[in-house]
Amino acid sequence: NAGVTQTPKFQVLKTGQSMTLQCAQDMNHNSMYWYRQDPGMGLRLIYYSASEGTTDKGEVPNGYNVSRLNKREFSLRLESAAPSQTSVYFCASSVRTPGLAGATGELFFGEGSRLTVL
Amino acid sequence: AQRVTQPEKLLSVFKGAPVELKCNYSYSGSPELFWYVQYSRQRLQLLLRHISRESIKGFTADLNKGETSFHLKKPFAQEEDSAMYYCALSGGASGTYKYIFGTGTRLKVLA
């Protein structure tokens, strides 16, 4: 069982280049998330998708776009990379059952993608 | 505003000593609180959630709505507890799907 798979694992970009981080989950989860992890800043939510067809901004959405391609896949795009976007990016997914106590499911994380922007 | 605060970046304790990792939150509504752990070279994983009220690996956490806290405790630390710990919050039954994390606390258990 693969769980949450992210690609690529490592990437080096020059300022101004674009790239897309891919994420796929095989657990039939309805919600998916993109985070960035920086020293001293913890995990910050970039974008999330509550369900297929919907996306919403998180805490730090500027400079990023997302696409919820289908229930399995949630991609993160950097249109014009900046050095401030050097970080480790994590994709995560969960199942959520609205209307019930304990509705929020456990987050399952990918291994992370280390991005360096020069 | 939805916010999670972990005041300690680093906590060092000796093996066998008690551990308390602090977490305070801000949320208008009934949130669900979680602790996640990241061991060296492993994926982030759920440690425990407030609604389960269970003890995992000897850790417990009680939700204190009056103090808006969800501190993680263990009576006797073990070396294998050394890791990065994150407190997280999300909306409950009718709340937001946003899943917010604190800045994390690195726990070092010394021999």
Image (cartoon, rainbow, N blue to C red):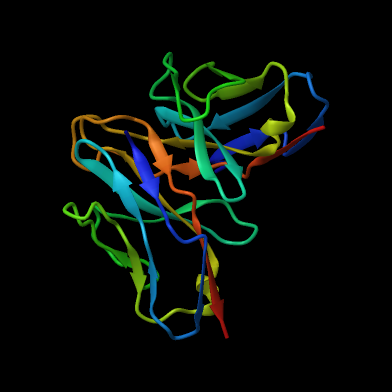
Q: Is residue A107 above or below residue B107?
A: above
Q: Residue furthest left?
A: B66
Quadrant assignment, res B75: bottom left
> In what quadrant of the picture does the N terminus of chain A appear?
top right
Image coordinates of residue B100 in percent, x first then y, are 41, 39
Towards the viewer: B75 or B12 = B12
Q: Say which residue appears at 24% left-offset and 61% top-offset.
A: B62
Image coordinates of residue A5 in percent, x first then y, are 61, 37
Image coordinates of residue B77 in percent, x first then y, are 44, 79
User: What is the number of callouts on the image?
Assistant: 0
> In what quadrant of the picture does the C terminus of chain A appear?
top right
Image coordinates of residue A67 in percent, x first then y, are 55, 16
Q: Say which residue appears at 52% left-offset and 60% top-offset.
A: B9
Towards the viewer: A98 or B4 = B4
Towards the viewer: B98 or A25 = B98
Towards the viewer: B74 or B21 = B21
Q: Say which residue appears at 52% left-offset and 29% top-offset.
A: A60
Q: Say which residue appears at 46% left-offset and 35% top-offset.
A: A93
Q: Residue furthest front?
A: B7
Q: Is residue B49 above or below residue B75?
A: above
Quadrant assignment, res A106: top left
Q: Is residue B24 above or below residue A35?
A: below
Q: Residue furthest top?
A: A53
Specify whether B65 is left or right of A61: left
